[in-house]
Image (cartoon, rainbow, N blue to C red):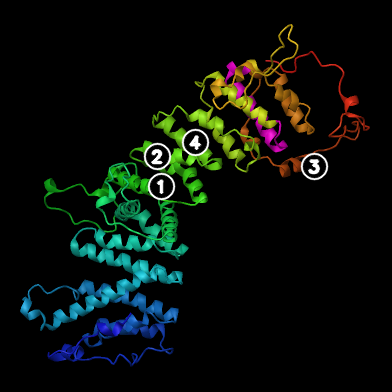
Amino acid sequence: MCLTESRFPPVATSGAVENLLNKRLNPNVPPKNEGPSITPAQVRQLAKEALESKGKLNNIAQLLELCESENEEIAYAAFTSMRHVYSRFLERGDLARNKNVVEEEKEEDVKTKVATWLRDNRTMYVQLAYRYLSHTEPAMQVAAMDSLMKVVKDMSVQSKEFKNAAFNSVVENVVVNGNMSEQLLQRIVEDLNQYDDVRYYFYKDFGKYLASLTDGVSTGAGVKSVTKRRKYSIPADKLSSVVNVGYRILSAIRDPATDDSQLGTYYYNLPPTSTPSKKKTYPPSSVKEHRKVFSDTWLSFLRQPMSADMHKRVLLSMHKRLIPYMLRPTLLIDFLVDSYDQGGAVSMLALNGLFTLVTEHNLDYPDFYTKLYALFDKNLLHVKYRSRFLRLVDLFLSSSQLPSYLIAAFIKKLTRLALNASPAAIITVVPFVFNLLKKHPACLVIIHREQEPGAAEMTDPYLPTETDPAKSRALESSLWEMQTLKTHYLHTISGLVRVFEQPIAKQHMYDMEDFLDHSYTSLFESETRKKINATAPPPAPALASHAKVVGLLDALPSTRTETPLFVI
């Protein structure tokens, strides 16, 4: 930046101001106070002199140069001093345009030239502030944001309305800042959470910016097509940075207000009007307007490419942070269905959002339970999000209005998967199935089914590969899988399965939180804490049914018990 260009040209005037205007510093000679010996106190003194004497106004050019000093302490002192100087100039009216001077006299009017020069240097200072939003020093980033918000406030006071044109430039420069520090983020969020007008216009401006990135796509909820808007063409890496910064800010903003009475704290307070009948509704004072820009911004944001981790975090908070405040929550259906198609944990979290839309916003989505059933694959009980998934399934299947064939299908699918699961997963499955049977008594018939007289061999009619739970024939089957788990090598599991030997109606439901987070480590620690009875006979080997090694055929029982294992 060439700061010498902003200094006054020589003019034919008179008085002290004439001497100042005729002063032209040599571009090749640095300012007398610039150098390694200058201190922050001397920098602040330069600012004080510029405010006290018109003959020292050239200190402003020197302060601008010091703002780019390699010494960060000096640069910070100069930058913050400049903010103070221009704040005082605005209060005194030194930057105002002289409307009483005719056009022909403006070029010769000294006061007009001084005001023009001050405004030009202020423009350079604002451009420097935009650059310093991505400064390596967090304190300088915060100082830059303070200066820019002060500019917005000053321009709002001059125009007697919130100057969104200036604030829009701040928003666009903030969201493209790939070097945003945590301190700057906190400074931005502080204003967004405190001031209703700042929050409203941030949503409005950022939403439009995002919509411009989605060329020609309507965001719904009243947002017009972006075909007539300015288009932004940015590289993929820059777009990724915009999405990351945008999400950091959006996720930190407090939940929208639910009533107009909760609004009323503004960064710029509108002056009272003398004609109430002509007064229009101030958008930042309306909950409906806040929800509109909130919805538009998030719908535009969800159309942008995002990382897998961010995708999961968005879905994880959607039912609490987004859906309750959207004008039309059902517009999220496309995003949620696309998310489900990605598989894995993303599919599970997408179903959580869909479930909220179905149960709370009357979304007609008949394939919900079919899609949920499809997630019960061979890997389900081995993934790290198993406990989270089962918590959601417990919620999805909690309604007593669900048909018994549907509940039976999920029970059979889960018990079948338990045959190849780890002990920690099985310990979760057993009480989970018990609770489902307790909630849905019509499914108790599958606990035990007698073999038909004359049948040579009893077969399981359940179709595990059927994708439609209505066609799986689960209600015709039985829980022979639980009979198998009764012989599990871990006595904790075999003992837990025996809960089905007692009438279910007389037993209490399990608290699933006691089982969902078990792991090999927790099971091992539990076993080691148990006290051993010294008088008890030694336990049988874990993986054999005899104390001595025998052949496999010799170890098989010769007859099968005819006594039913489970009792309804």
Q: Nearer the viewer, mark 1 or mark 3?
A: 1
Q: What range of the chain is rendered magenta?
A: 419-444
For marks 3 and 4, give the one nearer the viewer.
4
Q: Is residue 103 left or right of residue 513?
A: left
Q: Mark 3 or mark 2, which is nearer to you? A: 2
N-terminal-most mark, 3 or 4: 4
- Residue 14 point in image, percent of width and height: 12, 91
- Confirm or deny contact between disc 3 and disc 4 (CB under 8 A): no
Magenta stretch, main secondary structure class? helix
| 432 in the magenta segment | yes
Q: What residue type is labelled 1?
A: Leu
Query: Horizontal and vertical percent for residue 440?
Result: 57, 20
Q: Nearer the viewer, residue 430 or 509?
A: 430
Image mark for residue 528: 3
Q: How crowded is mark 3: few (under 14 residues within 10 Å), some or many (20 or more)?
A: few
Q: Compute the Cα span from label 3 to label 4.
A: 39 Å
Q: Residue at point 68% right, 21% down? A: 479
Nearest the eye: 38 or 66: 66
Q: How crowded is mark 2: few (under 14 residues within 10 Å), some or many (20 or more)?
A: many
The kind of secondary structure element at disc 4 is: helix
**Residue placed under numbered mark 4 in the picture:** 351
Residue occupied by mark 2: 332
Q: Residues within 10 Å of mark 1 (few under 14, many from 20)?
A: some
Tag shown at residue 302? 1
